[in-house]
Image (tube, coloured by chain):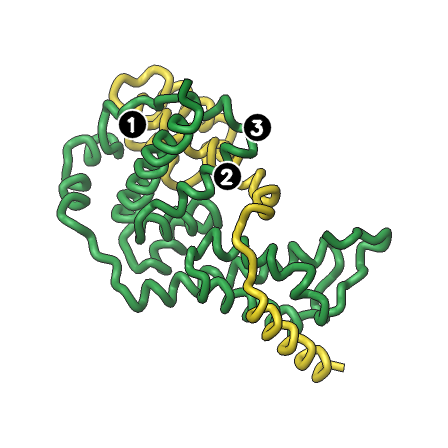
Chain colours: A yellow, B green
């Protein structure tokens, strides 16, 4: 069995989904039953679930994210054209 | 969005990168850095490094993601630079937390955190929710936001993050705790406010 401290350490070291199956099992069991760290660590796990899911959705958020300004784009275009030419 | 070719090793010529990937990379850098100037610098550095390393591109994935891979390293460099300019200090509230009984005994901040005002899981398929989440990350204060970006979004190990931010693992734990706390508060404010019935 894991102690409260071991559970917290495991959760701060990595995403619980990435733990070995046994460790994940005991961790989930502990957090379900523990009256000391359960409530808190359940929220930590929830936050990990949320961040994992956020990363999966990230690419579809691109349309609402800020875009490069035209002047910077123009500068970059010139720079890239110059660099690409030097390369040939 | 450029059309994907049949041939996976098709490489877009660098002259067209700005128009094809500029906005994508800039948006990505902004989500991590939140500073328009450093984000634009990051895109520029990425393109230059990309041109230099182009002969090492193996065509196994879209060049967009290859460039993004380069940029992820540039982002860490930028954060390292900004941390060097402003030293990360621990405030007394955080010290008290680390000294507290609950932290020393079980590695948690409190036994009784406030419950969520709504169930975030129900919104995991809702793209609007993630847009709000995106803006909520903005509101997390430095250096907790930087710690969150490096540790959670960029999935660096604890040692790496501690090195970049120049903090102890215990303090990193506090920073991540603060980030989670603030994220939850601003999510509740923005999301429940929007969907209140």
Give the residue drawn at x 31%, y 67%: B84
Which label lies toward us, 3 or 2? 2
Answer left or right for A22 relative to B113: right
Name which of mark 3 and mark 2 comes first in the sequence.
3
Instruction: Look at mark 1 in the image and give the residue it sits on.
Output: A4
Locate residue B61, reporting x and y percent. 72, 53
Query: What is the number of the mark on residue B131?
Result: 2
Q: Is residue A4 above or below residue A57?
A: above
Q: Foreground: B185 or A53?
A: B185
Q: CA distance from mark 3 to mark 2?
A: 12 Å
Does B193 sit left or right of B123 as displayed? left
Q: Position of residue B160 (x, y in %)?
A: 40, 56
Image quadrant in which the C terminus of chain B is located: top left
Work out whether disc 1 and disc 3 sit on a shared chain: no
Name the one closer to the observer, B120 or A32.
B120
Q: Chain of mark 1?
A: A
Residue annotated with mark 3? B125
Using residue B65 as the reference point, say whether residue B97 is left or right of it.
Answer: left
Q: Dot 1: what SS? A: helix
Nearest to the eye among marks 1 and 3: give it: 3
Residue B39: horizontal and vertical position, in percent? 48, 62
Helix, strand or loop under label 3? loop
The answer to whether B6 appears left or right of B116 in the picture is: right
| Dot 1 alpha-carbon crowd within 10 angstroms: few under 14, some 14 to 19, many 20 or more | many
Q: Is residue A53 above or below residue B86?
A: above
> Which residue is at 30% across, 26% downward?
A40
């Amino acid at each position: 069995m894991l102690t409260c401290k071991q559970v917290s350490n495991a959760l701060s070291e990595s995403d619980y989904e990435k733990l070995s199956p046994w460790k994940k099992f005991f961790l989930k069991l502990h957090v379900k039953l523990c009256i000391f760290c359960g409530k808190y660590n359940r929220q930590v796990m929830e936050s990990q679930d949320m961040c994992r899911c956020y990363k999966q959705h990230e690419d579809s958020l691109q349309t609402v994210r800020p875009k490069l300004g035209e002047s910077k784009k123009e500068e970059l275009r010139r720079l890239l054209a110059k660099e690409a030419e030097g390369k040939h | 969005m450029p059309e994907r070719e049949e041939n996976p090793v098709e490489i877009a010529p660098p002259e067209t990168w700005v128009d094809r990937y500029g906005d994508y990379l800039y948006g990505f850098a902004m989500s991590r850095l939140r500073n328009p100037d450093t984000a634009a610098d990051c895109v520029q550095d990425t393109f230059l490094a990309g041109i230099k390393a182009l002969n090492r591109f193996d065509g196994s994935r879209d060049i967009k993601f290859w460039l993004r891979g380069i940029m992820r390293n540039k982002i860490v460099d930028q954060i390292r630079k900004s941390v060097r300019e402003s030293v990360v200090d621990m405030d007394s509230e955080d010290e008290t937390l680390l000294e507290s009984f609950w932290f020393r005994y079980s590695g948690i901040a409190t036994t009784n955190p406030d419950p969520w005002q709504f169930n975030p899981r129900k919104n995991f398929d809702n793209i609007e929710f993630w847009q709000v989440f995106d803006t909520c990350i903005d509101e997390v204060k430095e250096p907790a936001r930087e710690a969150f970006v490096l540790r959670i979004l960029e999935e660096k190990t604890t040692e790496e993050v501690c090195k970049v931010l120049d903090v102890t693992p215990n303090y990193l734990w506090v920073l991540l705790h603060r980030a989670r706390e603030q994220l939850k508060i601003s999510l509740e404010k923005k999301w429940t406010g929007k969907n209140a019935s």
